[in-house]
Image (cartoon, coloured by chain):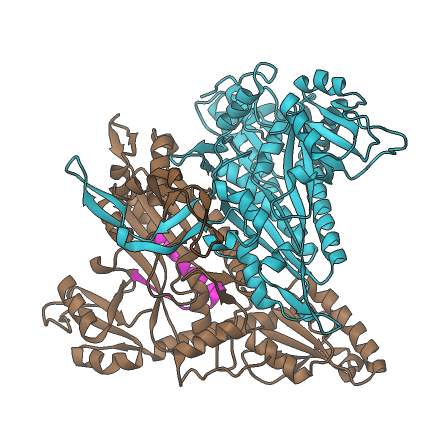
Chain colours: A brown, B cyan
Amino acid sequence: MSKNITKRSEDYSKWYQEVIANSELIDSSPVRGCMVLRPNGFAIWENIKADLDRRFKETDHVNAYFPLLIPQSFLSKEAEHVEGFAKECALVTHHRLRTVIGEDGKPKVEPDPAAKLDEPLVIRPTSETIIWHMYGKWINSHRDLPVLINQWANVMRWEMRTRPFLRTAEFLWQEGHTAHATREEAEEEATRMLQVYKDFCYETLAVPVVTGVKTANERFAGAEDTYTIEAMMQNGWALQSGTSHFLGQNFAKAFDVTYRDQNNEQVHVWATSWGVSTRLIGALIMTHSDDTGLVCPPKVAPIQIVITPIWRNDEQKSVVLDFTDKVHGLLRKHFRVKVDDREGVKPGAKYYEWERKGVPLRLEVGARDVEKNSVFSARRTGGKKQGMVVDENFLHTVENALNEIQQTLLDNAIALRDSKTKTIRTYQELLDGIKDGGFFMAPWKDDSVNEDKIKDQCRATIRCYPTVQDDLDGEVCFYSGEPATHWALFARAY
Amino acid sequence: MSKNITKRSEDYSKWYQEVIANSELIDSSPVRGCMVLRPNGFAIWENIKADLDRRFKETDHVNAYFPLLIPQSFLSKEAEHVEGFAKECALVTHHRLRTVIGEDGKPKVEPDPAAKLDEPLVIRPTSETIIWHMYGKWINSHRDLPVLINQWANVMRWEMRTRPFLRTAEFLWQEGHTAHATREEAEEEATRMLQVYKDFCYETLAVPVVTGVKTANERFAGAEDTYTIEAMMQNGWALQSGTSHFLGQNFAKAFDVTYRDQNNEQVHVWATSWGVSTRLIGALIMTHSDDTGLVCPPKVAPIQIVITPIWRNDEQKSVVLDFTDKVHGLLRKHFRVKVDDREGVKPGAKYYEWERKGVPLRLEVGARDVEKNSVFSARRTGGKKQGMVVDENFLHTVENALNEIQQTLLDNAIALRDSKTKTIRTYQELLDGIKDGGFFMAPWKDDSVNEDKIKDQCRATIRCYPTVQDDLDGEVCFYSGEPATHWALFARAY
């Protein structure tokens, strides 16, 4: 059962795959690039979803559901948008199978030529086009604004190279699509949602993302501005973990969505869209996990606490299991708890298994613990094992332990990020440093051509112009030598 | 804004469409047969989902997510299954669009012939095949059983005639797929989930479904037994509202899923699947709504309570709005509440709007109510308006009112169902009665050919052999005159 996991220092990519396989988060499927989210993996997504959904509703958003399929002509309506998505979309062309006799004499099925669609349909890679078509029907007056809709959905992008959670053909995500009367309101919404994402990553995933704005090269197809949250993985690579777009009036113009303003004139509305996906699970794995296996922040862990009763004989067994039931009963209403009372599996093997699977807190119950009315606790984040008395403060003690584990994960991640973030002023420093990963903050003159050159030369890209910008007074671009326009964050990215 | 809704007695089908349009539950989309679930409609689905998900988890099921796309060859592996679904499935054949110049000289997009898939992929109409492929990887030993997985997903069936909620090309649903060591366990699971559905319909939707088993003609493609919940709509037609299938070993054999039993032999596992969909929203609309518009049971209503402040002058306005805020503050933590303080819309128009939209409870706040520290309450289910004092019992009073509304809806639905359910012993009674709708319980000798004849003659179908069967002693089939094998429930169905 228990397999050794490759060390991170040996092969980070292999380590990542093995952590995932060992914790049974996902499995590969017979469909190229599509993954199966197994119960353990899906449970993390359910917890992410519940937390984000609450934050969206607190900021006055409502959920809706739009069709999976989009007429192919819709994609062309926004010029940059089709450019961005046409090359990787799944196309539905027929609506019926027929049975024919194959060359081997056996019956087989194939698309029925008589059931070809007049217009092929695209499986949504993102839903701006179909949603803006609908907004054209719903928005007429300023009274209809703002529209603040979010959708939880599956989307499909036919990527050539896939990697579990980070880049898959089908993935689960949420996409917010909002419509506003003014540019200012839409810009405010785009930055508000970036902040919601940032707060969520810090507070719930314990992933200390850097926020900023993308350069023109890295913008979403159809956006005027793309804001991003960038996380640092343990190998120093960046993972773009969520984006929020100010779309200007691009989609409103493409789908002719206008409202009558105070001067009684028809004007186009302003838009945003924003999304995060199951990629966030990849972010948390590569932020927190270690050479033993998965480490999952308590706030999203499918199992927060595992209780392992230990006995040596039948007499002990009865006493220990009774006490375990009591402890389980106390905890189950407040936490996600599992009791591992399997027989024939040694305690050490159980500990190792739950460590590999990332359970934050383990409570051991032996005969001597029962006598002392206590349990022995071990944290996935390490440190000495501690006794916990099962008294009136027990729930509080457990809650504190989980909160401390959550905080430890965040502290460690911040420390790692900061230790691997350098301010540089010469290009040579980037060339020397990028091999070992890390975030490089450099004074920079905004220039798409130079940006491409650097990417070609050393695979570093500008992840963003961070929201918090240090003084640029007198700084010159570390690449061109011209006066700098921004502090830019360079890194290698997934 | 306010449109009159056609009376049910005039045109039930038109009434249904207009109730939906007026309550902004859904909108039609540019994709044939696909609907947009607007925020009001989607919120009902969210409430249904949360309630069912809790019931599934209480019965030890876990959620997972499987790919949207299924290789077309998978469908053929189970002979009846492909027969059932091949004729109505959406096929993905290409993975890229290319831009070409159209006849009008303008660029347009089309599937790129160079990006044709080796094997077309089917958008899941249901997921037995892909899931059983995965179960083949996961199940080896009896220790791996049972597998109790549920999936919340979108599915696609290319139906020729569609009707909002009842039959659409894409719809949202849940599909449970379980694997068991023995026939008995699987049969028990199939009936357990039927009971979960029944309890949910009674308790949460206030829809008094009849449970039973389908005849061979109406079985799911690939099932050995299909259990069903059948609801009666107000026009006396039946709506199949959910099904639970005992699949025997059909899919285990098709995908060769075996485990090693106690005799150390490889044996095929036993299966069930069970699902309900957004069709349930159609069921609740046609069970409870009236000529004024939507009536939504409190347990799933997007808005359970609307508060309408009423004032005649600025002095009143300030006092009334303060009191409204107070009432809102008391209720919002416990109920889904909306305050309608729009100016320029008359109270009567507001009342009518919220009635059309199905809000169960309306609280009116006028200057005189504030003086009396009370609100005036009106129930969507009718009856006299009542004052409610805003004292320490207020929350309890409101909760009671919502519970009574929920109970009234169930009582009315049961009364209607029972009044339109007749026991018959001659075929003429069915021919005479079926035009006006209703459930007809008839002694019947199981016979697929006769069943088809009756369907052709009068469009009545056997909805099920109800779980609760009266004594058949001496009864003869109302159609063939031969000894009866079952009491059968005949009805016209959607």
Q: Is residue B391 visible?
A: no
Q: Quadrant of residue A277?
A: bottom left
Location of the C terminus of chain B (image quadrant):
top right
Instruction: Indicate the position of residue B99 as horizontal and vertical percent values.
Output: 21, 47
Residue B284: in magenta span: no
Q: Is residue A407 visible?
A: yes
Q: Quadrant of residue B392?
A: top right
Q: In the drawing, does residue B99 fall left or right of residue B424?
A: left
* Residue at 42% in and 55% down: A103
* Residue at 33% in and 79% down: A420
Residue A316 drawn above or below residue A339: below
Location of the N terminus of chain B (image quadrant):
top left
Q: In the drawing, does residue B106 fall left or right of residue A309?
A: left
Name the magenta segment's main secondary structure. Answer: helix
Span colored in magenta: A191-212
Instruction: Indicate the position of residue A134 as horizontal and vertical percent values.
Output: 37, 35
Q: Quadrant of residue B477?
A: top right
Instruction: Indicate the position of residue B217 as horizontal and vertical percent values.
Output: 66, 37
Instruction: Indicate the position of residue B208 as horizontal and vertical percent values.
Output: 72, 34
Residue A446 drawn above or below residue B328: below
Q: In the drawing, does residue B118 fall left or right of residue A29?
A: left
Q: Looking at this view, is B296 or B478 the one in front?
A: B478
Q: Looking at this view, is A207 or A310 the one in front?
A: A310
